[in-house]
Image: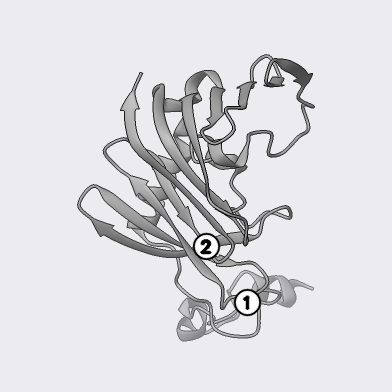
Amino acid sequence: MEESQRSQAGEGLSPDRRNQQPDRYPGVGEGPIEPRVTRPFINALSMIMSWRHVGAFRATVHSRTGNNPEKRYSLEANPRLLRYTLQDLDTGSVEQFDGEARARSFNGSTETVHPGEMTPEAVAARLAFPMSLLIWGRAIDNYRFTGAVTRSGDHTAIGIEHVRDKSLHGSLILDERRRMLTKLESAADYLSYEDISAI
């Protein structure tokens, strides 16, 4: 028993074996561990996670899902207060959302948002509320981060891949000056904010 405990603590190992790091761990897959986390990726992720610090803004939204035609919206969002107003520029219909009041309205008809709803915001508003994007590798998500990051001026491209089919890739664009996501592009979805201005 004592010998077993010494071995588990590393006391019974030679210095070479004690300091050796395994190239894989039980239950973590069959191949070597891939170094996917870098400081630029952590910095970008930290900025995305700080979305509640983004001030109120307005933007024109371009949104496309699957083979559906692209739709355009006018968006006014206040991430700090969990609120937005979204107007369909083709039909004129208006959606309003108040996360603190747990209320969502369509053309004036209001409904209560269930507190357990994981992604209550409209797809077109989700760059302003990035925890509702299906990119985090959760059970409800279609995509997860790859760790790939490419910077160009004030913008950082962040790689994502499909959780079940790694041949399907996409990217997010982070505007570091505004400290917010401005584009999501994947095999099935396209979402972009343009003409962004503070309110």
Cα gap from disc 1 to disc 2, whole angstroms: 31 Å
Name the residue located 54 percent from the left edge and 28 percent from the top edge. Answer: 87
- Determine the secondary structure under disc 2: loop
Q: Where is residue 195 in the image (x, y as percent from the top left)?
A: 32, 35
Left or right placement of residue 167 versus residue 183 in this view: right
Name the residue located 63 percent from the left edge and 76 percent from the top edge. Answer: 25
> Which is nearer the N-term, disc 1 or disc 2?
1
Specify the color scheme.
one colour
Say which amino acid is labelled 2.
Ser
Task: Give whichever of 150, 77 is nearer the camera.
Answer: 77
Left or right placement of residue 112 versus residue 157 in this view: right
Name the residue located 60 percent from the left edge and 61 percent from the top edge. Answer: 143
Name the residue located 63 percent from the left edge and 22 percent from the top edge. Answer: 97
Say which amino acid is labelled 1.
Tyr
**Residue 177 quadrant:** top left
The quadrant of the image that shows the N terminus is bottom right
The residue under label 1 is 25
* Mark 1: few/some/many CA within 10 Å (<14, 14-19, 20+): few
Decide: is 192 above or below 118.
Answer: below
* Mark 2: few/some/many CA within 10 Å (<14, 14-19, 20+): some
Q: Where is residue 141 in the image (x, y as percent from the top left)?
A: 67, 55
Specify the label residue 186 is tagged with. 2
